[in-house]
Amino acid sequence: MGPSAPHEPLLMPTATASTASSGDEEDIARGRVVVCPVDALPSDEKRQAKFSMRTFFRYAGPGWLMSLAYLDPGNLEADLQSGVYTGFQLSWVMLLAHAVGLLLQCLSARLGFVTGKSLAQHCREGYGPRTGTILWILTEIAIIGSDIQEVLGSAVAFRLLFGIPLWMGCVITAADTFTFLAAQYLHGTRVLEGFVVSVIMIMCACFFANLDIVKPEPISVALGFIPSVASYAVVQMVGVVGAVIMPHNIYLHSALISSTRRIDRRNPRALEQANVYFSLDAAVALVVSFFINTAIMTSFAQGFFSPHCATNPSGTLGCNTAAIEPAGECALEDCNCVNSMGQQGFCTAIGLSNGGSALASLVGSSEFAATLFAIGVLAAGQASTMTGSLAGQYVMEGFLGLHIPLWLRLLVTRSIALVPALVVAVWQSTAAGESAASLSAVNDWLNILQSIQLPFALLPLLHFVGDAKVMGHDWVIGSRLKSVCWACALALIVINAYLLHSQLANLKAGPFMFALGVAAFGGYLVLMGTAVRSELKAFLRCIWSP
């Protein structure tokens, strides 16, 4: 017997003609909501319905919108720096992060189509006002941090392509998102999803063309998938995890499915089919995302990694063949270096702001490579700003139970994100911020912020998909999958603890700062515990029961 629908209180009206509300009918007519049909059973009812590309196309879309968070400028910077500062050795981390990300996105999608509600809505209803408010604030901080990365990334691309000041690029990026999101409102969800797929294909073309120009060694690429991490690569590893698996994206996926797709959730076969097609949609999108991220990482690993620069006492650096003199951040006695291609350069910081010129120098002053890189970064920044805005709207509506017009939500978040982005842009234009290290440092800490915030999306997700009262007995996750998910959560918490310790050590923190850091981490653990109180109580009963 197929899986049954969850408990009745969680059921929402289905998209049938008899039950759809007038608002639903208007959204469907305008293309803002897509009705997902159920494939007909074959004549032999013991056989499962065959895969239908036409039906899959009706389900496909949320996965591609979600995947843009895996391709935003913060990810591109993390990919670039992973290659420059650690070589190929974090390729396995990239693969593992995408695999874990796919698992979490499938669980988020399941929560959305089984219950008809987003993760933010469940947090509002399942936790008390205090915990729910704290989770909302933390999620908003993560969204604003991601928004800063997207604005800065697009501004850098505008400067590389058109030579305009960084601050002007920030203003343009903050304004042009309204145009893209207006297309969704006026022409429907499918238009926005089609635009996003087109942008991702542009990114594929740009970054794979650069990969072909650099031509990394296949053996070196393959060795990167053997797990190993040098001590100087730990912070970069955490940054990769934080850049790839973003907390607001877990909230976004469940909201996209529950709000843009209509499924007859009283029909067990409809739920089974939705589980297959939504999971496949996410898998295809994240496979493409993985290859794009890996292409960037391997391109820069081949041309700019140097063990000599990576062990710089003041922080890891790359071997930049475009540099005409050592950068101020190089604390080595000898800042000369040789990359894996035998080219000479100097140890410098390399990031989005100078990655294009570094590539151009690497392949013989080819402006074509630099232009491709800039176009790819611009595509990533412009597209990811749209999904970030959508995530902000869904999170605010879900946690607060308020319907906020998208233009108003966008105006608020853009205004908040624009101020720190402009500060960084102005600083970058001064003598103190001329090097790529300034933007890179901001991006690194924002990626680490995402990693620290991730448990506050991950733990509520695991709490609700593991609750039979929410999911129904047939759609609650099994014990094996639950164990894997909780192991991932525990690993992330341990990584964050190590990160806090290493950063305090690098800052040469005194006893007061160290105690403050320990207290902050203790509060971090307590706050996470409030999100999974029932699981902790069950675990303690299991330990203490005779």
Image: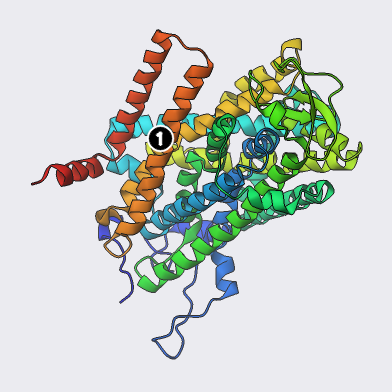
Q: Secondary structure at mark 1?
A: helix
Q: Is residue 448 above or below residue 475?
A: above
Number of other residues with Cα within 10 Å of mark 1, as a class: few under 14, some 14 to 19, many 20 or more: few
The residue that disc 1 covers is 494
Taking the view exactly as shown, the residue that stands out farthest to the left is: 546
Measured as percent of width and height from the top left, residue 261 is found at 49, 59
Q: Quadrant of residue 324?
A: top right
| In the foreground, 153 or 225 | 225
Measured as percent of width and height from the top left, residue 129 is found at 29, 33
| In the foreground, 512 or 194 | 512
Taking the view exactly as shown, the residue that stands out farthest to the bottom is: 43
Q: Is residue 8 visible?
A: yes
Q: Is residue 408 visible?
A: no
Measured as percent of width and height from the top left, residue 530 is found at 28, 34
Quarter of the picture containing the N terminus is bottom left
Identify which residue is drawn at 83% across, 32% down.
Answer: 357
Identify which residue is drawn at 90% across, 38% down.
Answer: 367
Three-letter code for the amino acid on which mark 1 is drawn: Val
Q: Is residue 259 above or below residue 315?
A: below
| In the foreground, 526 or 539 | 539
Measured as percent of width and height from the top left, residue 476 is found at 31, 59
Residue 303 lies left or right of residue 388; in this view the side is right
Residue 545 lies left or right of residue 380; in this view the side is left
| In the foreground, 264 or 487 | 487
Residue 335 lies left or right of residue 151; in this view the side is right
